[in-house]
Image (cartoon, rainbow, N blue to C red):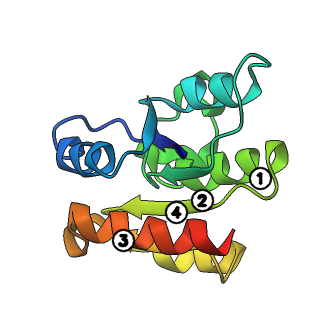
Amino acid sequence: MKRILLIDEEKEPMKYYLMALKQANYELIVTRTTDAAIKFLTDDNNQCPDLCILDYMLPPGNRYKGNPDCNQGMSTGRLLYNDIRGIYPDLPIIILTNSRDAFKEMKIINPNIPVLQKIENAPFDLVEFIKEVLAKS
């Protein structure tokens, strides 16, 4: 069973994505904060997930508190993306967000990173996309 780490603070909008991923038999690890995500990824007792789904706009938490790039949660996902890359350089990461700025900003960091808009991707579309990403990794 493939393990997916989902990092998103929104519970209600994400519930349908979670249901679709569970129905597709993925093991889900859900973290709602940047601090919880880093704690999970650096805990020696946890295995590396097979894939990470990361929201672009997240509360900064203690990790990024005071960072000027995290004004009202803007760009927190970019900072967390870079930190995750430092821990697991080869972990497939999908940015799933409502932010229109995410696409431009993340493509500057890595032109190959998948950035999907929540509003444009139904839960089962995400499941199919994940299957494609995992097949390539």
Q: CA distance from mark 2 to mark 1?
A: 9 Å
Q: Earlier in the sequence, mark 4 or mark 1?
A: 1
The x, y position of residue 4, in whole percent, is 51, 44
Three-letter amino acid code at the position of disc 3:
Glu
In the depicted view, which residue is nearer to us: 84 or 43?
43
Q: CA distance from mark 1 to mark 3?
A: 24 Å
The x, y position of residue 64, in whole percent, is 63, 34
How many numbered markers are drawn? 4
Q: Badge 4 is on which residue?
A: 94
In the depicted view, which residue is nearer to us: 47 or 25?
25
Q: CA distance from mark 4 to mark 1?
A: 12 Å
Q: CA distance from mark 3 to mark 2?
A: 15 Å
Q: Is label 4 in contact with label 1 (beta carbons under 8 Å)? A: no
Q: Badge 3 is on which residue?
A: 128
Q: Earlier in the sequence, mark 1 or mark 3?
A: 1
* Mark 4, secondary structure of its residue: strand
Q: Badge 2 is on which residue?
A: 93
Q: Is residue 134 left or right of residue 101?
A: right
Q: Residues within 10 Å of mark 3 (few under 14, many from 20)?
A: few
Three-letter amino acid code at the position of disc 4:
Ile
The x, y position of residue 97, in whole percent, is 36, 60
Q: Quadrant of the C terminus?
A: bottom right
Q: Earlier in the sequence, mark 3 or mark 4?
A: 4
Three-letter amino acid code at the position of disc 2:
Ile
Residue at x-position 24% and y-position 65%: 124
* Label drawn at residue 85: 1
In the depicted view, which residue is nearer to us: 74 or 49?
49
